[in-house]
Image (cartoon, rainbow, N blue to C red):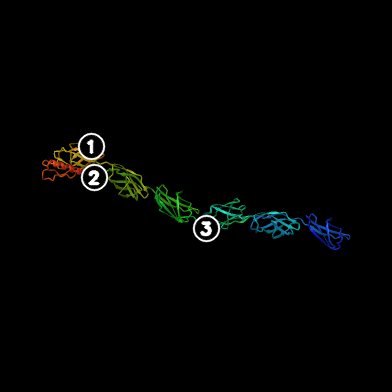
Amino acid sequence: MAGGTLVTVTGTGLAGATELTIDGASVPFTQVSATEISFTTPAHAAGPVDVVVTTPGGASNALPFTFVAAPVLTALAPDEGPVAGGTPVTITGTDLAGATSVTVDGVSVPFTQVSDTEISFTTPAHAAGPVDVVVTTPGGASNALPFTFVAAPVLTALAPDEGPVAGGTPVTITGTGLGGATSLTIDGVPVPFTQVSDTEITFTTPAHAAGTVDVVVTTPGGASNALPFTYVAVPAIVSLAPDEGPAAGGTLVTVTGTDLAGATGLTVDGASVPFTQVSGTEITFTTPAHAAGPVDVVVTTPGGASNALPFTFLPAPVLTDLAPDNGPETGGTSVTIGGTDLGGATSVTVDGVSVPFTQVSDTEITFTTPPHAAGEVDIVVTTPNGASAPLVFTYTPVTTVDGVTPPTGPATGGTEVTISGHCFTGATAVRFGSTPATSFRVVNDTTIVAVSPAGTGTVDITVVGSTSCGTGTLPGGFGYIAAGGSTGAPTGGGIASTGVEPIVPMTLGVLALLVGAVSLLIARRRRGAQH
């Protein structure tokens, strides 16, 4: 219809042509020969028109020339596809009949004439971006419609890239060219997804057997590269070793099981605790302090939460009473400890020092006090579940008589003797045998000076201490020298005459002083051993 078509008219008697008309309108022409004339069509409305040649012989018969309407494209379906080509496209429009070419970005492509209003073709490979699609018919070239070549999507990351076989893991896909995504598959099976942006898509994993599967996104640009998502088996705990420990915590526990690799958490009674990943089948942790009783231990991995196994926190021993709760500093007091959870006791300490003990039951232990300085000390029982809180045992001071100087004196009495010992402060009496001393005075807590009464033989020396200290006795501590030189044989701190010959008073006195000094030294050493 736009004109411009070069037309050749052939016939007879055409020589000397004077005019050529199209639909009655004269148009320029060229006389090629007596049988041929050529002309170029003017613009004209669509439809057939008569072409007539006039010569001096008159007007010729008319032949029809048809002005064909230019094709008009109305739609491409689809109007986008991958840069790899291969997209079947349907062109719809008007006056498409007799199409002579279809071009994509100016390049002719094979096509199929479906009808006067429809043509189909397959896209070739092409760089990403929009291009013009044009159809040409005898009516001319159509308007251009855009077809967009879309770059294939590229996946760069899955976050996270693993999750439990039960599914339910929210995953974010990042990449390029993800706009207009048409599907997302996991191991080839489509799953619902959310288009966040041209670079991000989210989805939730379905349930799937353990192992690695491909995640692929498809857009009009085609299918993306595949990224792996690993389905992780649910961890299973088989044992805890040990499976019990003190409520104070501090027990090193080994967890064994299957599929423990990549553990992300370990809980004891629901509370997270630090742990060490030893292998895919072993984890260790140290128990925290916890109230007594069984609690659940659970391991969590990307595969989910494991089954629970019980760990039992055992109560520490509790002491409720000591019977008796006091005794002499010389030791030897049999004490019964009452309490709870005393079973399996590993030690009993008195002021921090371990002593022998007897396990009577889970609620009773007995022991004998060792010697100790007077005062309060802590009694503690330790079991595999920890150490008890202490109970107080009180060591009471004891009066002891360790030595007498001099250890002998005349039967008439009157000898001033120095008594050495312990806990003399507050002493109320000194006896030579059963006879009270003529007099005595307390020098200090370890020394008394007393005057001997009249007596015979070897007698015990007794000091009656304060109420808190009691009475102390040195058996055979003093020997009386009879008139004429004989004496009994002292068994303690005294000295006896060899007995037949009278002893010169001077010699006897010196000897008594020496023996008394030795006796005092021995007595002090004995006292030191007791303490």
Where does the C terminus fall, quadrant-wise? top left
Query: Based on the displayed image, in which of its 4 quarters is residue 10 positioned?
Result: bottom right
- The total number of labels drawn is 3
Please say whether residue 6 is visible from this viewpoint. Answer: yes
The residue to which callout 3 is attached is: 211
Circle 2 sits in a helix, a strand or a loop, which is it? helix
Which dot, 3 or 2, sits closer to the camera? Answer: 2
Please say whether residue 477 is visible from this viewpoint. Answer: no
> Which x, y percent locates residue 3?
79, 55
Give amino acid for label 3.
Gly
Q: CA distance from mark 1 to mark 3?
A: 94 Å
In the image, taking residue 46 as reference, residue 488 lies left or right, namely left
Tell which circle, 1 or 2, labels the residue nearer the N-terminal end.
Answer: 1
Tag 1 near tag 3, CB within 8 Å: no
In the image, taking residue 517 as reference, residue 210 lies left or right, namely right
Tell which circle, 1 or 3, labels the residue nearer the N-terminal end.
Answer: 3
Circle 1 sits in a helix, a strand or a loop, which is it? strand
Mark 3 surroundings: few (<14), some (14-19) or many (≥20) residues within 10 A: few
Query: Based on the displayed image, in which of its 4 quarters is residue 53 positioned?
Result: bottom right
| Along the viewing direction, whichever of 342 and 43 lies nearer the viewer | 43
Give amino acid for label 2.
Arg
| Along the viewing direction, whichever of 486 and 34 lies nearer the viewer | 34
Tag 1 near tag 2, CB within 8 Å: no
The residue to which callout 2 is attached is: 525
The residue to which callout 1 is attached is: 443
In the image, taking residue 252 as reference, residue 27 lies left or right, namely right
Vertical order, 399 against 64 (above or below): above
Give amino acid for label 1.
Val
> Which x, y percent locates residue 251?
40, 50
